[in-house]
Image: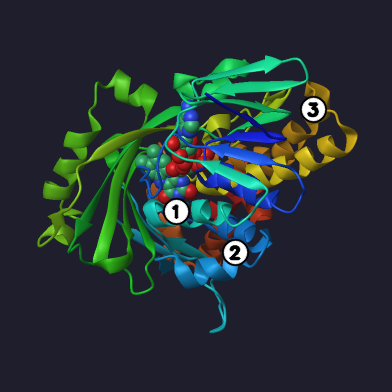
Amino acid sequence: MTHHDYDIAIVGAGPAGATLALSLAHSGLRIGIIDKARFPRDVICGDALSGQVLNVLKRMPDSIYQDFLRDVPKTPSWGIRFHSPGNHPLELPYIPQRTTEQDPPGYISPRLAFDRFLQERLSRYPSIHPIEGEAVKEVKIIPDGVELQTENRIIHARMVAGADGIGSLVRKSLSNRTLDKNYYCMAVRTYFEGVTGFHPENFIDLYFIKDLLPAYLWIFPEVDGRANVGLGLPYPLLIRDRLSLKPILKKLISSDPFISKRFINARQVTPIQARGLAIHRNLHDLSGDRYLLMGDAALGVDPFSGEGIGFAMASAESAAAVILECTRTGDYSASGLADYDHRIARRTEKEHNASAAMQRYARYSWLFNMVVKRANKSKAFQELLSAAFTNVDIRKRLGNPLFYLRMLLGG
Ligand SMILES: Cc1cc2nc3c(=O)[nH]c(=O)nc-3n(C[C@H](O)[C@H](O)[C@H](O)COP(=O)(O)OP(=O)(O)OC[C@H]3O[C@@H](n4cnc5c(N)ncnc54)[C@H](O)[C@@H]3O)c2cc1C
């Protein structure tokens, strides 16, 4: 057994954990970051990087954003194409009137490459000690700190940040926050080559399926001519209707009249794999005595889009600010860390509530078709919807049913 002493121990080096470590790289704190995987490692994901991810990258130190633009394989994406249950496609550019100089507002990048990019940066800083290929097996509070154990090490730190994904050991060991199956989704994903019919500006495609609403099948254009293809469904629906995602995905690809024509000459290149998403609306109890939870460990995926990388990185950014303040005061108690919960609530709660409302409304195919038809007739309405996906202030209003009524009635 080797012994290590850090100021901050981070469990998990995915987008949440790596962002926290990098955000604290120049703080003078000694940081240990432990991941059970060896990088590069894959994560079952749609691989879509939203504007929120790019904004956090831009604020990170040492020109990370420029290096990301230069080094990470990725497809620039300029919008979303919704296919309503009646298959009326609706194209929504993220930036309705853009200039030629604008950077792409989003990308599709394989997690294998994106997570490796972040993880590789960790070893550039003497203040960060990355440990790969070792699972943390135990986390406990001790007088004046925390103790973590892996197979080979005992680690002491002043506090621990849980960035260890949806099954978080840190959450299970230290917090009362539990995964509620009512706010849980299952999703499957595979990669194809030879899919056709992409939008010339790499819009991401979401096909809403009439009998499975609010579920959608996604087709995202990847680098090297690949497509990331997947399907997600709320867990209560899966159980109620005894559904199984893999055969449904296969059937949609082979015989849905609108989807299958894009796969005529396509070849599946990876197995279909499943992973869960936690879409809790309540984002409280994210911190306590000597710990905080970030990203999927905090159960914070967006209820409508399933986007979680942005939340993972944004929560890590907030965590870094609070940890710096705790270090200044020397107080890592629950009250010292409580500001973290407040920051997350301010940053995400309204947006998550809006997304949860959108997920509810998307269950009604008549409403969906009506919105799409109306948007296809009205440029102004289309621009409003585009803004709803990119402008946080407009997005926050999406939780209010009156907002939809006004839009539909043309107000
Ligand atoms: C099918 C699917 C599609 C998705 N598509 C998108 C998308 O297109 N865009 C998007 O933004 N989000 C998407 N998401 C959500 C996104 O994948 C997650 O929100 C994101 O990965 C969260 O990042 P994280 O750093 O919190 O956790 P993770 O990426 O899960 O990283 C956690 C890390 O912790 C490590 N770890 C776990 N336990 C331990 C332990 N005991 N000891 C040491 N290390 C440990 C793991 O090895 C892992 O590296 C999707 C999710 C699913 C399931």
Q: Residues within 10 Å of mark 1 (few under 14, many from 20)?
A: many
**For the residue labelled by badge 3, is the local secondary structure a helix, a strand or a loop?**
loop
Residue at 27%, 36% (x, y): give it.
211
Front position in the image: 211 or 197 = 197
> Gap in Å between the C-alphas at discs 1 and 3?
30 Å
Q: Amino acid at mark 1?
A: Arg
**For the residue labelled by badge 2, is the local secondary structure a helix, a strand or a loop?**
helix
Q: Which residue is mark 3?
A: 332
**Labelled pair 2, 1 in contact (Cβ < 8 Å):** no
Report whether 134 appears left or right of 250.
right
**Labelled pair 2, 3 in contact (Cβ < 8 Å):** no
Q: Amino acid at mark 3?
A: Tyr
In this view of the protein, can residue 364 be seen by the observer? no
| Label 1 within 8 A of ligand 1 by Cβ | no
Front position in the image: 126 or 14 = 126
**For the residue labelled by badge 1, is the local secondary structure a helix, a strand or a loop?**
helix
Q: Which residue is mark 2?
A: 64
Percent of width and height locating residue 351: 62, 43
Query: Residue 5: which numbered mark, if any?
Result: none
Report whether 91 appears left or right of 294.
left
Looking at the image, tell me whether mark 2 or mark 3 is earlier in sequence order: 2
Q: Which residue is mark 1?
A: 116
> Gap in Å between the C-alphas at discs 2 and 1?
13 Å
315 is higher (above) or lower (below) than 293: below
259 is higher (above) or lower (below) than 31: below
| Label 3 within 8 A of ligand 1 by Cβ | no
219 is higher (above) or lower (below) than 325: below
Looking at the image, tell me whether mark 2 or mark 1 is earlier in sequence order: 2
> Gap in Å between the C-alphas at discs 2 and 3?
29 Å
Q: Amino acid at mark 2?
A: Ile
